[in-house]
Structure formats: C-alpha cells, structure tokens
Amino acid sequence: MVSQSPDMKITPPAPIRAPSAVPVDDAALPFEVDALDLRGRLTRLGPALDDILTRHDYPPPVCKLLGEAIVLTTLLGSSLKFDGRFILQTQTDGPVSFLIVDFQAPDRLRAYARFDATQLKDGQDSGSLLGKGHLAMTIDQGADMSRYQGMVALEGGNLEDAAHEYFLRSEQIPTRVRLAVGEEWRGGEGPKHRWRAGGMLLQFLPKAPERARQADLHPGNAPEGAAAHAVAEDDAWVEGQSLIATVEDVELIDPDLSGERLLYRLFHERGVRVFAPLPLRAQCSCSRDAVSAMLKALPQKTAPKWSRTARWW
C-alpha cells in the first residue's frame, strides 16, 4: 500500500448506477471508456430533426442525406467550448449539389439542401446522391477571431467515409463515426410519421501520444516499389473499432432504447462513464422583425415585392 501525500488531491470516484431506461431525444450524450482511452458522443434526434426536414418538401432520399449531415454536425459541433458556430457544407456534382448545416453553440441547429429532382432515382445511396466534390467544416469563433476550416474531397463515398478521411488527414486522431436516419410510423393519436436519427462518434485519445500514432499518408510521388510506412494499431483502439462496428442503424434510431442503455450494451465489460446530455433544438436565426428592418433599409426602387419571410432551414 502506498500512502497518499497530504498535498495530493484525491478525486472522488464517480457514482455508479444502472443505465437510465428513459430515452432522451434531441441531445448529445458525451461519454468515455477510460479503460480503453476512448472518448465519444452519442446523438439522438427526434422532434428537432423532424421539424427541420418537414419544413421543406424534400423527397425521402434527400431528407435522409440531410439528416445524416445534421447528425454529423451535432457530433462535431457539440464539442465546442465557446459560443461559436460549426458549419458543415458540401458542394458536389450529384443530384444533391449543396448541403449546409449550421450549429450555433450551445444548442441551435438549422439546415438546408439544394437538389435536382430530375436526377433522383430509386435506390440511390448517400454516395450517389452526393457525387464528387468537397466537404468543408468551418469553426467560426466570432467576429474578433479567425476562422478555421478543414476540407476533404468527396469521391462518391458517404458522409461517414468523408468524416473518417477528414480526421485522418486534418486532425490525425483515430476516429470512427456511425450515422443513421429513418422514418418512424406509428398508429393511434398524434403524428403517424416523423423522422428520427442517431449517431455515434468514437475517438482514441491515449495519454501517451505515441500510442495514437498512425501510418503516414500515401506519399503519392514515392519511387515505385518503395515500402509503405506501417504502424500496428493499438490493441485498445482495435477493440474500440470492433465494438462500434457492431452498432446497427435500428439501435441508433430506436425511440424506445435509451442512449445510456445502448452505451452499456457496447462497453459494459470495460466500464463506461456518461456525462450530462447536451440539449439540441431547431431554430432559425431569421425573424419577421429582422427581415422587415432589412427591407425598409433598401432603396425604394430595388426593394423586392414580397412580404413573406424566407426560411432556409
């Protein structure tokens, strides 16, 4: 036994309890698996997502793709430690040529998609809807601070693939992402149809940096026959990837399965700690007063002849 120094601060152990069985929608739930040096967030979206998607007459495939973009944005934007904005945007040559999701810390969401209905076909997945182009992620820290932007090419893959490529090339943090969007149909009173979504982000953040080291990116112009640099993955990260790979779409969007119970299913053998959920809500920044003030400020000759407030979310 080692005696504790009187000057040493002892952190009290976190309370241990059974996972809550009460599902919480429209929230991001941070968690950690200390035994594996894993950190992450689990997002569950219900009414807020349905509010955004049903305000426009989007076809179901476009709703699903935009929903995936919204989930990815909440997983990344909810980690902001300041009152700024996280903006995810795609520009591509596919049927859905433009997506934008704006997360304003700590909890406001809005989103918009531009698509060509004539190019939509049955059975198209997210990759074929996007096509080729780029995905940009922007962190706006406010008027007096510089913006940070990361960009990754879209080559026909889905948003999960793009997120993995972004973290590999820009952040160099071992990361895995799961996204799921679905339609819920229920009988009885109330709405019979609504959109739901869920997502999980898992990162390997060991205290020793060398444990998170990854193989070098493909050099591109290396001489033919040059040996590629290889680094064995840490066993803890191998286990983490294996566990998140078992998560099914239905588990991420199940309205009767709480986020805590889902995390317990995955990590109970290693021990998982959850933190206070971060609420999310759909809210557009425009207002009737703001649009009215803008119209009044325009010269009379150039003022547009409409009075309805335009909303982009």
Image (cartoon, grey):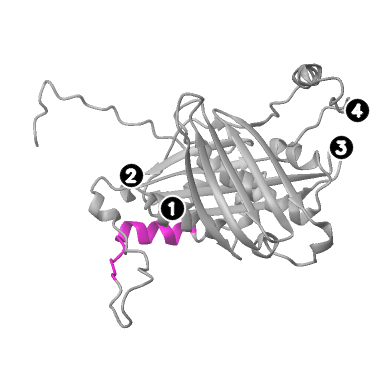
At label 2, the amino acid type is Asp
| Majority secondary structure in the magenta region | helix
- Label 2, on which residue? 34
CB contact under 8 Å: marks 4 and 3: no
**First-in-chain label (1 vs 3):** 1
Q: Gap between marks 4 and 3, in whole Å?
A: 42 Å
Identify which residue is drawn at 69% across, 26% down: 285
- Label 1, on which residue? 167
- Label 3, on which residue? 189
Pick the quarter of the image with the C terminus: top right
Residue sticking out furthest to the front: 301
**First-in-chain label (4 vs 2):** 2
Q: Which mark's residue is nearer the viewer, 4 or 2?
A: 4
Task: Give SS at disc 3.
Answer: loop
Image location of residue 146, percent across then percent down:
45, 32
Pick the quarter of the image with the N terminus: top left
At label 4, the amino acid type is Lys
* Above-or-below relation of 278 to 174: above
Task: Give SS at disc 4.
Answer: loop
- Label 4, on which residue? 305
Q: Nearer the viewer, residue 39 or 187?
A: 39
**First-in-chain label (2 vs 1):** 2
Task: Give SS at disc 1.
Answer: helix
